[in-house]
Amino acid sequence: MANLTFKAENFSFLSHHTNTQTSLLNTTNSFKANSLRLFHSKNSLTFRVWCSIKEKENVTESERVPDVLTGLKGVDELDPKRVSSLDFEQKLGNDGGSSEVGFDWNWPPWKNIPQRYKLIGTTSLAFVICNMDKVNLSVAIIPMSHQFGWNSSTAGLVQSSFFWGYALSQLPGGWLAKIFGGRKVLKFGVLTWSVATALLPFLAGYMPGLMLSRVLVGIGEGVSPSAATDLIARSIPLEERSRAVAFVFGGLSVGSVIGLLLAPPLIQNFGWASVFYIFGFLGLAWFLGFQYLEEGQASHATKPASRPQSIHMEKSFSNSLAALGGSLKDVPWKAFFRTPSVWAMIYAHFCGSWGHYNCLSWLPSYFSEELSLNLTEAAWVSILPPLASVFVTSFAAQLADNLIANGVETTTVRKICQTIAFLSPALCMTLSSVDLGLPPWEIVGILTGGLALSSFALSGLYCTHQDMSPEYASILLGITNTVGAIPGIVGVALTGYLLDTTHSWSISLFAPSIFFYLTGTIVWLAFASSKPQNFSNTD
Protein backbone atom coordinates (compact mmCIF):
# COMPACT_ATOMS: atom_id res chain seq x y z
CA MET A 1 0.00 0.00 0.00
CA ALA A 2 1.22 3.49 -0.81
CA ASN A 3 0.27 6.62 1.11
CA LEU A 4 0.81 9.86 -0.76
CA THR A 5 0.15 13.18 1.01
CA PHE A 6 -0.42 16.32 -1.04
CA LYS A 7 -1.48 19.92 -0.38
CA ALA A 8 -5.20 20.48 -0.86
CA GLU A 9 -4.78 23.45 -3.16
CA ASN A 10 -2.95 21.25 -5.65
CA PHE A 11 -5.92 18.89 -5.91
CA SER A 12 -8.98 21.10 -5.70
CA PHE A 13 -10.10 19.59 -8.99
CA LEU A 14 -10.99 16.33 -7.19
CA SER A 15 -14.05 17.94 -5.70
CA HIS A 16 -14.81 20.62 -8.31
CA HIS A 17 -13.96 19.09 -11.72
CA THR A 18 -16.18 16.15 -12.45
CA ASN A 19 -14.48 15.14 -15.70
CA THR A 20 -11.06 14.93 -14.18
CA GLN A 21 -12.35 13.00 -11.23
CA THR A 22 -14.14 10.63 -13.54
CA SER A 23 -10.96 10.18 -15.60
CA LEU A 24 -9.07 9.35 -12.47
CA LEU A 25 -11.65 6.89 -11.19
CA ASN A 26 -11.97 5.23 -14.57
CA THR A 27 -8.40 4.08 -14.31
CA THR A 28 -9.45 1.84 -11.46
CA ASN A 29 -11.69 -0.24 -13.71
CA SER A 30 -8.82 -2.52 -14.61
CA PHE A 31 -7.99 -2.93 -10.94
CA LYS A 32 -11.13 -4.98 -10.32
CA ALA A 33 -12.01 -4.89 -6.61
CA ASN A 34 -9.30 -2.50 -5.48
CA SER A 35 -10.02 0.12 -2.84
CA LEU A 36 -9.79 3.87 -3.34
CA ARG A 37 -9.90 5.96 -0.20
CA LEU A 38 -9.61 9.70 0.38
CA PHE A 39 -8.84 11.14 3.78
CA HIS A 40 -9.04 14.83 4.57
CA SER A 41 -6.83 16.32 7.24
CA LYS A 42 -6.85 20.12 7.45
CA ASN A 43 -5.26 21.36 4.22
CA SER A 44 -3.94 18.03 2.91
CA LEU A 45 -5.34 14.91 1.31
CA THR A 46 -4.09 11.34 1.60
CA PHE A 47 -4.48 9.11 -1.45
CA ARG A 48 -4.22 5.36 -0.93
CA VAL A 49 -4.31 2.61 -3.56
CA TRP A 50 -4.20 -1.15 -3.10
CA CYS A 51 -3.50 -3.43 -6.00
CA SER A 52 -1.78 -6.72 -6.66
CA ILE A 53 1.31 -6.96 -8.84
CA LYS A 54 -0.58 -9.02 -11.38
CA GLU A 55 -3.38 -6.49 -11.61
CA LYS A 56 -0.90 -3.61 -11.83
CA GLU A 57 0.86 -5.23 -14.78
CA ASN A 58 -2.49 -5.68 -16.57
CA VAL A 59 -2.97 -1.95 -16.78
CA THR A 60 -2.03 -0.90 -20.30
CA GLU A 61 -0.14 2.25 -21.05
CA SER A 62 -3.34 3.89 -22.35
CA GLU A 63 -5.15 3.13 -19.10
CA ARG A 64 -2.52 4.64 -16.80
CA VAL A 65 -3.30 8.02 -15.23
CA PRO A 66 -1.34 10.71 -17.06
CA ASP A 67 0.78 12.89 -14.83
CA VAL A 68 -0.66 16.00 -16.48
CA LEU A 69 -4.19 15.06 -15.34
CA THR A 70 -3.40 14.05 -11.79
CA GLY A 71 -0.61 16.47 -11.11
CA LEU A 72 1.09 13.70 -9.14
CA LYS A 73 4.85 13.64 -8.78
CA GLY A 74 7.01 10.57 -8.27
CA VAL A 75 8.47 9.92 -4.88
CA ASP A 76 11.91 10.90 -6.06
CA GLU A 77 10.56 14.27 -7.26
CA LEU A 78 8.81 15.26 -4.03
CA ASP A 79 10.21 17.88 -1.74
CA PRO A 80 12.25 16.25 1.02
CA LYS A 81 9.98 17.78 3.66
CA ARG A 82 6.97 16.23 2.01
CA VAL A 83 8.71 12.88 1.63
CA SER A 84 9.31 12.78 5.34
CA SER A 85 5.57 12.93 5.90
CA LEU A 86 4.89 9.83 3.84
CA ASP A 87 3.54 6.97 5.90
CA PHE A 88 4.75 3.63 4.51
CA GLU A 89 2.42 1.04 6.00
CA GLN A 90 3.49 -1.88 3.86
CA LYS A 91 6.64 -2.71 1.87
CA LEU A 92 7.06 -4.26 -1.53
CA GLY A 93 6.66 -7.99 -1.99
CA ASN A 94 4.52 -9.02 0.99
CA ASP A 95 3.08 -12.49 1.29
CA GLY A 96 -0.19 -11.38 -0.19
CA GLY A 97 1.52 -10.44 -3.43
CA SER A 98 0.62 -6.78 -3.26
CA SER A 99 2.82 -3.81 -3.99
CA GLU A 100 2.87 -0.04 -3.88
CA VAL A 101 2.02 1.86 -7.01
CA GLY A 102 4.72 4.21 -8.26
CA PHE A 103 7.57 3.01 -6.05
CA ASP A 104 10.72 1.23 -7.28
CA TRP A 105 12.21 -0.68 -4.38
CA ASN A 106 15.77 -1.96 -4.77
CA TRP A 107 14.87 -5.51 -3.81
CA PRO A 108 16.06 -8.19 -4.33
CA PRO A 109 19.67 -6.96 -4.13
CA TRP A 110 20.52 -8.43 -7.56
CA LYS A 111 17.51 -6.73 -9.19
CA ASN A 112 19.50 -4.08 -11.05
CA ILE A 113 22.39 -6.35 -12.08
CA PRO A 114 22.36 -6.92 -15.86
CA GLN A 115 20.71 -10.19 -16.71
CA ARG A 116 23.74 -11.62 -18.49
CA TYR A 117 25.88 -11.11 -15.37
CA LYS A 118 23.37 -12.98 -13.21
CA LEU A 119 23.53 -15.83 -15.69
CA ILE A 120 27.32 -15.92 -15.74
CA GLY A 121 27.53 -15.81 -11.93
CA THR A 122 25.09 -18.64 -11.30
CA THR A 123 26.62 -20.77 -14.06
CA SER A 124 30.09 -20.29 -12.61
CA LEU A 125 28.80 -21.38 -9.19
CA ALA A 126 27.36 -24.52 -10.78
CA PHE A 127 30.79 -25.25 -12.24
CA VAL A 128 32.37 -24.83 -8.81
CA ILE A 129 30.10 -27.57 -7.47
CA CYS A 130 30.72 -29.57 -10.65
CA ASN A 131 34.42 -29.98 -10.00
CA MET A 132 33.91 -30.51 -6.28
CA ASP A 133 31.94 -33.61 -7.23
CA LYS A 134 34.58 -34.57 -9.77
CA VAL A 135 37.68 -34.36 -7.54
CA ASN A 136 36.14 -35.85 -4.40
CA LEU A 137 36.76 -39.38 -5.70
CA SER A 138 40.41 -38.64 -6.51
CA VAL A 139 40.96 -38.12 -2.75
CA ALA A 140 38.46 -40.67 -1.45
CA ILE A 141 39.88 -43.35 -3.76
CA ILE A 142 42.88 -43.73 -1.42
CA PRO A 143 40.93 -44.88 1.70
CA MET A 144 38.37 -46.66 -0.48
CA SER A 145 41.14 -48.72 -2.11
CA HIS A 146 42.42 -49.69 1.32
CA GLN A 147 38.93 -50.63 2.52
CA PHE A 148 37.90 -52.65 -0.52
CA GLY A 149 41.35 -54.00 -1.46
CA TRP A 150 41.61 -52.36 -4.89
CA ASN A 151 44.88 -52.26 -6.82
CA SER A 152 45.86 -49.35 -9.11
CA SER A 153 44.17 -50.90 -12.15
CA THR A 154 40.85 -51.24 -10.31
CA ALA A 155 41.14 -47.74 -8.86
CA GLY A 156 41.83 -46.41 -12.35
CA LEU A 157 38.79 -48.25 -13.72
CA VAL A 158 36.56 -46.78 -11.02
CA GLN A 159 37.79 -43.26 -11.69
CA SER A 160 37.49 -43.65 -15.45
CA SER A 161 33.82 -44.66 -15.23
CA PHE A 162 32.94 -41.00 -14.72
CA PHE A 163 34.23 -40.25 -18.21
CA TRP A 164 32.07 -42.90 -19.83
CA GLY A 165 28.99 -40.87 -18.97
CA TYR A 166 30.85 -37.65 -19.66
CA ALA A 167 31.71 -38.74 -23.21
CA LEU A 168 28.24 -40.13 -23.97
CA SER A 169 26.48 -36.92 -22.93
CA GLN A 170 28.54 -34.38 -24.89
CA LEU A 171 26.76 -34.44 -28.24
CA PRO A 172 23.29 -34.92 -26.74
CA GLY A 173 24.08 -32.07 -24.35
CA GLY A 174 25.02 -29.72 -27.17
CA TRP A 175 21.98 -30.71 -29.18
CA LEU A 176 19.59 -30.31 -26.25
CA ALA A 177 21.12 -26.95 -25.32
CA LYS A 178 20.42 -25.67 -28.82
CA ILE A 179 16.82 -26.94 -28.77
CA PHE A 180 15.70 -26.32 -25.18
CA GLY A 181 18.14 -23.57 -24.18
CA GLY A 182 21.20 -23.78 -21.96
CA ARG A 183 19.39 -22.86 -18.75
CA LYS A 184 17.07 -25.89 -18.78
CA VAL A 185 19.90 -28.25 -19.69
CA LEU A 186 22.15 -26.85 -16.96
CA LYS A 187 19.46 -27.39 -14.31
CA PHE A 188 18.97 -30.98 -15.46
CA GLY A 189 22.71 -31.61 -15.33
CA VAL A 190 23.17 -30.24 -11.79
CA LEU A 191 20.22 -32.25 -10.47
CA THR A 192 21.45 -35.48 -12.08
CA TRP A 193 25.05 -35.35 -10.89
CA SER A 194 24.07 -34.20 -7.38
CA VAL A 195 21.64 -37.07 -6.78
CA ALA A 196 24.14 -39.59 -8.18
CA THR A 197 26.92 -38.21 -5.95
CA ALA A 198 24.79 -38.47 -2.82
CA LEU A 199 23.88 -42.08 -3.65
CA LEU A 200 27.45 -43.31 -4.24
CA PRO A 201 28.21 -44.45 -0.64
CA PHE A 202 25.19 -46.77 -0.74
CA LEU A 203 26.56 -48.45 -3.89
CA ALA A 204 30.28 -48.46 -3.11
CA GLY A 205 30.37 -52.15 -2.07
CA TYR A 206 28.77 -53.25 -5.32
CA MET A 207 31.11 -52.52 -8.24
CA PRO A 208 28.48 -52.28 -11.04
CA GLY A 209 26.38 -49.95 -8.89
CA LEU A 210 29.40 -47.83 -7.97
CA MET A 211 30.41 -47.44 -11.59
CA LEU A 212 26.82 -46.67 -12.61
CA SER A 213 26.65 -43.83 -10.09
CA ARG A 214 29.84 -42.32 -11.49
CA VAL A 215 28.52 -42.72 -15.04
CA LEU A 216 25.46 -40.69 -14.00
CA VAL A 217 27.70 -38.04 -12.47
CA GLY A 218 29.54 -37.92 -15.79
CA ILE A 219 26.29 -37.54 -17.73
CA GLY A 220 25.13 -34.68 -15.52
CA GLU A 221 28.43 -32.86 -15.72
CA GLY A 222 28.87 -33.68 -19.40
CA VAL A 223 25.90 -31.62 -20.57
CA SER A 224 26.96 -28.58 -18.55
CA PRO A 225 29.82 -27.24 -20.73
CA SER A 226 27.59 -27.22 -23.81
CA ALA A 227 24.80 -25.53 -21.85
CA ALA A 228 27.21 -22.84 -20.65
CA THR A 229 28.66 -22.39 -24.13
CA ASP A 230 25.19 -21.93 -25.60
CA LEU A 231 24.33 -19.25 -23.06
CA ILE A 232 27.61 -17.38 -23.50
CA ALA A 233 27.35 -17.46 -27.29
CA ARG A 234 23.81 -16.06 -27.20
CA SER A 235 24.21 -13.36 -24.57
CA ILE A 236 27.84 -12.20 -24.38
CA PRO A 237 29.39 -9.86 -27.00
CA LEU A 238 32.75 -10.72 -28.56
CA GLU A 239 34.74 -8.14 -26.60
CA GLU A 240 33.55 -9.68 -23.29
CA ARG A 241 33.64 -13.31 -24.35
CA SER A 242 37.09 -14.30 -23.08
CA ARG A 243 36.28 -12.97 -19.62
CA ALA A 244 32.87 -14.63 -19.59
CA VAL A 245 34.31 -18.00 -20.60
CA ALA A 246 37.15 -17.59 -18.11
CA PHE A 247 34.79 -16.70 -15.28
CA VAL A 248 32.39 -19.58 -15.94
CA PHE A 249 34.95 -22.30 -16.66
CA GLY A 250 37.26 -20.81 -14.02
CA GLY A 251 34.68 -22.09 -11.57
CA LEU A 252 36.10 -25.54 -12.30
CA SER A 253 39.46 -24.52 -10.83
CA VAL A 254 37.77 -22.97 -7.81
CA GLY A 255 35.75 -26.16 -7.37
CA SER A 256 38.89 -28.25 -7.48
CA VAL A 257 40.49 -26.07 -4.81
CA ILE A 258 37.48 -26.18 -2.51
CA GLY A 259 36.96 -29.91 -3.06
CA LEU A 260 40.58 -30.78 -2.34
CA LEU A 261 40.58 -28.50 0.72
CA LEU A 262 37.42 -29.95 2.25
CA ALA A 263 37.81 -33.63 1.36
CA PRO A 264 40.75 -34.59 3.65
CA PRO A 265 39.35 -33.19 6.93
CA LEU A 266 35.89 -34.55 6.11
CA ILE A 267 37.33 -38.01 5.40
CA GLN A 268 39.50 -38.01 8.52
CA ASN A 269 36.69 -36.85 10.83
CA PHE A 270 33.55 -38.38 9.32
CA GLY A 271 34.73 -41.07 6.89
CA TRP A 272 35.09 -41.06 3.12
CA ALA A 273 31.33 -41.30 2.55
CA SER A 274 30.80 -37.83 4.03
CA VAL A 275 32.31 -36.02 1.04
CA PHE A 276 29.71 -37.55 -1.27
CA TYR A 277 26.79 -36.75 1.03
CA ILE A 278 27.83 -33.15 1.62
CA PHE A 279 28.92 -32.30 -1.92
CA GLY A 280 25.76 -33.88 -3.32
CA PHE A 281 23.64 -31.79 -0.97
CA LEU A 282 25.37 -28.60 -2.18
CA GLY A 283 24.31 -29.37 -5.74
CA LEU A 284 20.72 -29.93 -4.67
CA ALA A 285 20.82 -26.63 -2.77
CA TRP A 286 22.05 -24.87 -5.93
CA PHE A 287 19.20 -26.40 -7.91
CA LEU A 288 16.56 -25.21 -5.43
CA GLY A 289 18.18 -21.78 -5.13
CA PHE A 290 18.27 -21.39 -8.90
CA GLN A 291 14.57 -22.21 -9.06
CA TYR A 292 13.87 -19.50 -6.48
CA LEU A 293 16.04 -17.00 -8.36
CA GLU A 294 14.16 -17.65 -11.59
CA GLU A 295 10.82 -17.15 -9.85
CA GLY A 296 12.06 -13.92 -8.31
CA GLN A 297 13.25 -12.61 -11.66
CA ALA A 298 9.92 -13.46 -13.25
CA SER A 299 7.86 -11.78 -10.51
CA HIS A 300 9.85 -8.54 -10.67
CA ALA A 301 10.05 -8.32 -14.45
CA THR A 302 7.71 -5.57 -15.66
CA LYS A 303 9.19 -5.07 -19.13
CA PRO A 304 10.19 -7.46 -21.89
CA ALA A 305 13.91 -7.86 -22.42
CA SER A 306 15.30 -5.17 -24.69
CA ARG A 307 18.31 -7.16 -25.92
CA PRO A 308 17.64 -8.94 -29.19
CA GLN A 309 19.78 -11.83 -27.99
CA SER A 310 18.21 -12.13 -24.57
CA ILE A 311 19.15 -15.01 -22.36
CA HIS A 312 15.44 -15.79 -22.29
CA MET A 313 15.47 -16.83 -25.94
CA GLU A 314 14.71 -20.38 -24.86
CA LYS A 315 11.72 -21.82 -26.64
CA SER A 316 8.61 -23.01 -24.87
CA PHE A 317 8.61 -26.66 -23.93
CA SER A 318 5.89 -27.59 -26.41
CA ASN A 319 7.61 -25.78 -29.28
CA SER A 320 10.90 -27.40 -28.32
CA LEU A 321 9.38 -30.86 -28.45
CA ALA A 322 7.87 -30.08 -31.84
CA ALA A 323 11.28 -29.03 -33.15
CA LEU A 324 13.09 -31.94 -31.56
CA GLY A 325 12.29 -34.47 -34.24
CA GLY A 326 13.61 -32.49 -37.17
CA SER A 327 16.48 -30.77 -35.42
CA LEU A 328 19.11 -33.45 -35.95
CA LYS A 329 18.79 -33.37 -39.73
CA ASP A 330 19.01 -29.56 -39.65
CA VAL A 331 22.47 -29.63 -38.07
CA PRO A 332 25.13 -29.20 -40.80
CA TRP A 333 27.22 -32.20 -39.75
CA LYS A 334 28.99 -32.55 -43.10
CA ALA A 335 30.03 -28.90 -43.06
CA PHE A 336 31.51 -29.34 -39.59
CA PHE A 337 33.72 -32.24 -40.58
CA ARG A 338 34.81 -30.69 -43.87
CA THR A 339 36.32 -27.74 -42.00
CA PRO A 340 40.03 -28.16 -41.05
CA SER A 341 39.74 -25.75 -38.11
CA VAL A 342 37.05 -27.98 -36.57
CA TRP A 343 39.45 -30.93 -36.73
CA ALA A 344 42.11 -28.75 -35.12
CA MET A 345 39.72 -28.04 -32.24
CA ILE A 346 38.91 -31.73 -31.91
CA TYR A 347 42.52 -32.84 -31.67
CA ALA A 348 43.53 -29.94 -29.43
CA HIS A 349 40.70 -30.81 -27.07
CA PHE A 350 41.81 -34.43 -26.98
CA CYS A 351 45.43 -33.47 -26.23
CA GLY A 352 44.57 -30.96 -23.53
CA SER A 353 42.17 -33.37 -21.86
CA TRP A 354 44.75 -36.14 -21.73
CA GLY A 355 47.06 -34.12 -19.52
CA HIS A 356 44.30 -32.45 -17.52
CA TYR A 357 42.20 -35.50 -16.66
CA ASN A 358 45.17 -37.69 -15.80
CA CYS A 359 46.64 -35.07 -13.49
CA LEU A 360 43.24 -34.40 -11.93
CA SER A 361 42.75 -38.11 -11.19
CA TRP A 362 46.29 -39.19 -10.28
CA LEU A 363 48.15 -36.23 -8.79
CA PRO A 364 46.96 -36.90 -5.20
CA SER A 365 48.21 -40.49 -5.53
CA TYR A 366 51.44 -39.32 -7.16
CA PHE A 367 52.14 -36.90 -4.33
CA SER A 368 51.26 -39.55 -1.75
CA GLU A 369 53.28 -42.42 -3.19
CA GLU A 370 56.12 -40.82 -5.13
CA LEU A 371 56.74 -37.83 -2.83
CA SER A 372 55.81 -39.70 0.40
CA LEU A 373 53.17 -37.18 1.54
CA ASN A 374 50.28 -38.24 3.78
CA LEU A 375 46.63 -37.97 2.70
CA THR A 376 46.12 -34.42 3.96
CA GLU A 377 49.43 -33.16 2.57
CA ALA A 378 48.84 -34.86 -0.79
CA ALA A 379 45.38 -33.35 -1.11
CA TRP A 380 46.48 -29.87 -0.07
CA VAL A 381 49.45 -29.91 -2.43
CA SER A 382 47.06 -30.96 -5.20
CA ILE A 383 45.21 -27.70 -4.54
CA LEU A 384 48.12 -25.60 -5.75
CA PRO A 385 47.71 -26.13 -9.54
CA PRO A 386 43.99 -25.24 -9.67
CA LEU A 387 44.51 -22.41 -7.18
CA ALA A 388 47.22 -20.89 -9.34
CA SER A 389 44.96 -21.45 -12.35
CA VAL A 390 42.40 -19.04 -10.92
CA PHE A 391 44.89 -16.17 -11.13
CA VAL A 392 46.33 -17.25 -14.48
CA THR A 393 42.82 -17.49 -15.94
CA SER A 394 41.98 -13.92 -14.97
CA PHE A 395 45.22 -12.59 -16.44
CA ALA A 396 44.88 -14.59 -19.65
CA ALA A 397 41.27 -13.53 -20.22
CA GLN A 398 42.07 -9.85 -19.70
CA LEU A 399 45.08 -10.11 -21.99
CA ALA A 400 43.11 -11.83 -24.75
CA ASP A 401 40.21 -9.39 -24.64
CA ASN A 402 42.56 -6.40 -24.65
CA LEU A 403 44.48 -7.74 -27.64
CA ILE A 404 41.25 -8.26 -29.58
CA ALA A 405 39.93 -4.82 -28.57
CA ASN A 406 43.19 -3.27 -29.82
CA GLY A 407 42.80 -4.82 -33.25
CA VAL A 408 44.85 -8.02 -33.03
CA GLU A 409 43.28 -10.72 -35.17
CA THR A 410 41.15 -13.08 -33.10
CA THR A 411 42.75 -16.21 -34.62
CA THR A 412 46.22 -14.94 -33.66
CA VAL A 413 45.11 -14.34 -30.08
CA ARG A 414 43.59 -17.81 -29.79
CA LYS A 415 46.73 -19.45 -31.21
CA ILE A 416 49.01 -17.59 -28.79
CA CYS A 417 46.91 -18.53 -25.78
CA GLN A 418 46.56 -22.19 -26.72
CA THR A 419 50.28 -22.54 -27.48
CA ILE A 420 51.10 -21.27 -23.99
CA ALA A 421 48.52 -23.70 -22.59
CA PHE A 422 50.25 -26.66 -24.26
CA LEU A 423 53.97 -25.93 -24.13
CA SER A 424 54.06 -24.79 -20.49
CA PRO A 425 52.86 -28.07 -18.90
CA ALA A 426 54.89 -30.09 -21.42
CA LEU A 427 58.09 -28.36 -20.32
CA CYS A 428 57.28 -28.66 -16.61
CA MET A 429 56.34 -32.34 -16.88
CA THR A 430 59.60 -33.00 -18.68
CA LEU A 431 61.55 -31.39 -15.83
CA SER A 432 59.55 -33.37 -13.26
CA SER A 433 59.96 -36.73 -14.99
CA VAL A 434 63.73 -36.46 -15.47
CA ASP A 435 65.76 -37.46 -12.42
CA LEU A 436 67.47 -34.16 -11.61
CA GLY A 437 67.69 -34.86 -7.89
CA LEU A 438 65.15 -32.16 -7.11
CA PRO A 439 63.50 -32.14 -3.67
CA PRO A 440 59.74 -32.86 -3.53
CA TRP A 441 58.66 -29.27 -2.99
CA GLU A 442 60.52 -28.06 -6.05
CA ILE A 443 58.79 -30.71 -8.14
CA VAL A 444 55.47 -29.54 -6.69
CA GLY A 445 56.32 -25.95 -7.66
CA ILE A 446 57.28 -26.90 -11.22
CA LEU A 447 54.12 -28.92 -11.80
CA THR A 448 51.99 -26.18 -10.25
CA GLY A 449 53.40 -23.58 -12.63
CA GLY A 450 52.98 -25.72 -15.73
CA LEU A 451 49.42 -26.84 -14.97
CA ALA A 452 48.39 -23.31 -14.00
CA LEU A 453 49.58 -21.92 -17.33
CA SER A 454 47.52 -24.56 -19.12
CA SER A 455 44.52 -22.40 -18.13
CA PHE A 456 45.37 -20.16 -21.07
CA ALA A 457 43.25 -22.70 -22.99
CA LEU A 458 40.13 -20.95 -21.68
CA SER A 459 41.10 -17.94 -23.79
CA GLY A 460 42.26 -20.14 -26.64
CA LEU A 461 40.46 -23.36 -27.56
CA TYR A 462 37.38 -22.80 -25.39
CA CYS A 463 36.56 -19.46 -27.03
CA THR A 464 36.99 -20.71 -30.58
CA HIS A 465 33.62 -22.52 -30.69
CA GLN A 466 31.77 -19.24 -30.07
CA ASP A 467 34.06 -17.34 -32.43
CA MET A 468 33.35 -19.73 -35.32
CA SER A 469 29.59 -20.01 -34.91
CA PRO A 470 27.48 -18.65 -32.03
CA GLU A 471 24.52 -20.55 -33.49
CA TYR A 472 26.22 -23.95 -33.36
CA ALA A 473 28.70 -23.26 -30.54
CA SER A 474 27.10 -25.73 -28.14
CA ILE A 475 27.07 -28.52 -30.73
CA LEU A 476 30.67 -27.82 -31.75
CA LEU A 477 31.71 -28.02 -28.11
CA GLY A 478 29.70 -31.22 -27.82
CA ILE A 479 31.71 -32.71 -30.69
CA THR A 480 35.12 -31.66 -29.39
CA ASN A 481 34.26 -32.50 -25.80
CA THR A 482 33.10 -35.98 -26.80
CA VAL A 483 36.54 -36.68 -28.24
CA GLY A 484 38.08 -34.80 -25.31
CA ALA A 485 36.42 -37.19 -22.88
CA ILE A 486 38.16 -40.23 -24.42
CA PRO A 487 41.40 -39.54 -22.48
CA GLY A 488 39.34 -39.71 -19.31
CA ILE A 489 38.12 -43.17 -20.28
CA VAL A 490 41.28 -44.56 -21.84
CA GLY A 491 44.02 -42.40 -20.33
CA VAL A 492 43.03 -42.62 -16.65
CA ALA A 493 42.63 -46.40 -16.81
CA LEU A 494 45.78 -46.78 -18.93
CA THR A 495 47.78 -44.78 -16.41
CA GLY A 496 46.75 -47.18 -13.66
CA TYR A 497 47.65 -50.20 -15.80
CA LEU A 498 51.05 -48.77 -16.77
CA LEU A 499 51.72 -47.92 -13.14
CA ASP A 500 51.10 -51.52 -12.10
CA THR A 501 53.26 -52.76 -14.97
CA THR A 502 56.21 -50.33 -14.93
CA HIS A 503 56.00 -48.85 -11.42
CA SER A 504 57.15 -45.59 -13.02
CA TRP A 505 55.20 -42.38 -12.73
CA SER A 506 57.30 -40.80 -15.47
CA ILE A 507 56.29 -43.42 -18.01
CA SER A 508 52.67 -43.90 -16.92
CA LEU A 509 51.64 -40.30 -16.15
CA PHE A 510 54.00 -37.77 -17.73
CA ALA A 511 55.36 -39.24 -21.00
CA PRO A 512 51.98 -39.67 -22.80
CA SER A 513 50.86 -36.19 -21.72
CA ILE A 514 54.06 -34.59 -23.04
CA PHE A 515 53.59 -36.32 -26.39
CA PHE A 516 50.03 -35.05 -26.83
CA TYR A 517 50.87 -31.52 -25.69
CA LEU A 518 53.60 -31.24 -28.34
CA THR A 519 51.61 -32.73 -31.22
CA GLY A 520 48.56 -30.68 -30.22
CA THR A 521 50.61 -27.49 -30.48
CA ILE A 522 51.72 -28.34 -34.02
CA VAL A 523 48.19 -29.12 -35.23
CA TRP A 524 46.72 -26.02 -33.55
CA LEU A 525 49.23 -23.62 -35.07
CA ALA A 526 48.79 -25.17 -38.51
CA PHE A 527 45.01 -25.40 -38.80
CA ALA A 528 43.19 -23.47 -36.04
CA SER A 529 41.01 -20.51 -37.02
CA SER A 530 38.48 -18.24 -35.31
CA LYS A 531 37.06 -16.94 -38.59
CA PRO A 532 33.22 -17.01 -38.44
CA GLN A 533 31.78 -19.88 -40.46
CA ASN A 534 28.33 -20.01 -42.04
CA PHE A 535 27.98 -23.77 -41.79
CA SER A 536 24.33 -23.78 -42.86
CA ASN A 537 25.18 -22.39 -46.30
CA THR A 538 28.11 -24.73 -46.88
CA ASP A 539 26.38 -27.99 -46.11
Image: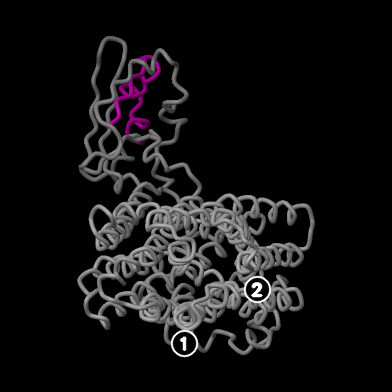
> Position of 226 compared to 202: left or right?
right
The x, y position of residue 104, in whole percent, is 40, 35
Q: Earlier in the sequence, mark 1 or mark 2?
A: 1
Q: Quadrant of residue 146?
A: bottom left
Asked which secondary structure carries label 2, the reply is helix
Q: Quadrant of residue 148?
A: bottom left
Tell me the magenta residue range.
Answer: 1-23
Q: Which mark is residue 326?
A: 1
Q: Nearer the viewer, residue 118 or 125?
A: 125
Q: Main secondary structure of the magenta part?
A: helix
The x, y position of residue 536, in whole percent, is 63, 82
The x, y position of residue 11, in whole percent, is 37, 20
Q: Amino acid at mark 2?
A: Tyr
Tell me, yes or no, whether the highlighted magenta stretch contains residue 474.
no
The x, y position of residue 422, in whole percent, is 66, 68
Q: Residues within 10 Å of mark 2 (few under 14, many from 20)?
A: many
Q: Amino acid at mark 1?
A: Gly
- Residue drawn at point x = 24 percent, y = 44 percent: 97
Check disc 2 and report the residue beneath it.
517
* Measured Cα–Cα span from mark 1 to mark 2: 39 Å
